[in-house]
Structures are given as structure tokens and as C-alpha cells.
Image (cartoon, rainbow, N blue to C red):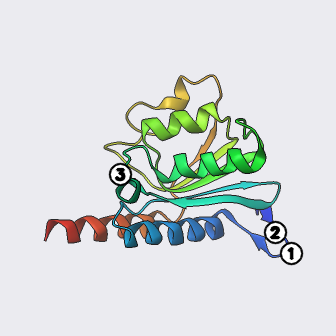
């Protein structure tokens, strides 16, 4: 994988570096009591928006990290189209989030853990197979770390 982003302080970030930031957002979601998933949107070598799940805090089943990050990025970019943006998500997006990524025309999706049950890109609905906009998908980035956060969260819920 090539190096992707040059930020203001001239530090070069790789997809793994951005996934680590998404993991921080996932941990913030966990602190709020939501499923620990984080998302970051990057454009023009800059982080545009960051979010973690807020379904519990907002009492909203659609308050997924990806949806919130897309909403923030659209406001900041003043556009519903994010075609020069990439999104980094700690978990393979569900069908709802995959469709939102497609509708926003996000260029590239990087995700960490695969979701064989509810995933909407590599599993299940495979939204991008049928979408007008074909988002490039790169999965498995820091997969073990992303999966461990989720497994630990759900293990504590079962106790």
C-alpha cells in the first residue's frame, strides 16, 4: 500500500496511521456506551471529519460512525458529493452505511475488521456490486486490533 496523506506538519500518514485514528474514535464510542466503531474522512491530504458511533447517545439507530462522519464532511465541504475523499472505518460498513458511502461518491473505503454477519461491502448485500458509483474497497487494515475492540465490548455485554 502506498503512502496516502500529507498533513499540515508534513508528517506522512499511511492507511494504518489513519486506521489508528479511527480506532481512537471507536474507543470514544465505547466510552459513550455505543458499539466501538470509528470513522475518518480524508481529502486533499487532510482529515476532514472524524466520528464514532453515537446510537446510544443520540437514541438514533442511524447514528453510525460512517453516517456521522459523512454528514460532517458534507457540511465542511459544502457538498453532498465527496468524490475526492477516502473513508477509514474500523468495521466493514453495514448496508445502510455502504449505500451512504456510495451516494456520497466517496472514492475509497478502507476498513479494519470484516463483518461476515452484517457487512454490506464484502459480505451480505455487497452494495458496491450494484451501485452506480463504484467505491474502491481495501479491507483488513489493522484487522486484529479492530476486531479485538469489538470482541472485548461484546464480551463485557454478555457477562
How far apart marks 2 and 1 lie (CA) works out to 5 Å
Q: Would residue 120 be visible to someone looking at this image?
A: no
| Left or right of 33 in this view: 106 | right
Image quarter for residue 44?
bottom right
Q: Could you tell me which secondary element the residue under label 2 belongs to?
A: loop
On the image, which quarter does residue 54 sit in? bottom left
Q: Residues within 10 Å of mark 3 (few under 14, many from 20)?
A: few
Please tell me whether mark 1 sits on a helix, a strand or a loop: loop
The secondary structure type at the circle numbered 3 is loop
Residue at the disc numbered 2: 7
Residue pointed to by mark 3 = 59
**What's the CA distance linking mark 3 and mark 1?**
39 Å
Q: Which residue is mark 1?
A: 10
Vertical relation: 21 (above or below) 102: below
**Closer to the eye: label 3 or 1:** 3
Quadrant assignment for the C terminus = bottom left
Q: Nearer the viewer, mark 3 or mark 2?
A: 3
Q: Position of residue 105 (x, y in %)?
A: 68, 35
Circles 2 and 1 in contact, beta carbons < 8 Å: yes
First in sequence: mark 3 vs mark 1: 1
Query: Which residue is at 64% across, 31% downward?
Result: 134
Q: Residue furthest left?
A: 159
Mark 3 and mark 2: Cα distance apart in space: 35 Å
Residue 29 % position (x, y): 43, 66
**Can you say whether 37 is above or below 12 in the image?**
above
Q: Are marks 3 and 2 in contact (CB under 8 Å)?
A: no
Q: Is mark 3 in CB contact (under 8 Å) with mark 1?
A: no
Amino acid at each position: 500500500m502506498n503512502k496516502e496523506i500529507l498533513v499540515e506538519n508534513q508528517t506522512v500518514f499511511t492507511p494504518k496511521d489513519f486506521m489508528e485514528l479511527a480506532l481512537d474514535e471507536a474507543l470514544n464510542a465505547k466510552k459513550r456506551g455505543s458499539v466501538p466503531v470509528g470513522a475518518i474522512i480524508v481529502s486533499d491530504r487532510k482529515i476532514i471529519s472524524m466520528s464514532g458511533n453515537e446510537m446510544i447517545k443520540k437514541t438514533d439507530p442511524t447514528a453510525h460512525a460512517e453516517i456521522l462522519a459523512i454528514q460532517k464532511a458534507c457540511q465542511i465541504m459544502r457538498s453532498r458529493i465527496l468524490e475526492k475523499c477516502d473513508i477509514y472505518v474500523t468495521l466493514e460498513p453495514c448496508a445502510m452505511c455502504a449505500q451512504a458511502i456510495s451516494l456520497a461518491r466517496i472514492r475509497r473505503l478502507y476498513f479494519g475488521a470484516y463483518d461476515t454477519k452484517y457487512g454490506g461491502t464484502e459480505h451480505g448485500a455487497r452494495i458496491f456490486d450494484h451501485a452506480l458509483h463504484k467505491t474502491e474497497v481495501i479491507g483488513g487494515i489493522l484487522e486484529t486490533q479492530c476486531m479485538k475492540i469489538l470482541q472485548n465490548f461484546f464480551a463485557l455485554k454478555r457477562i
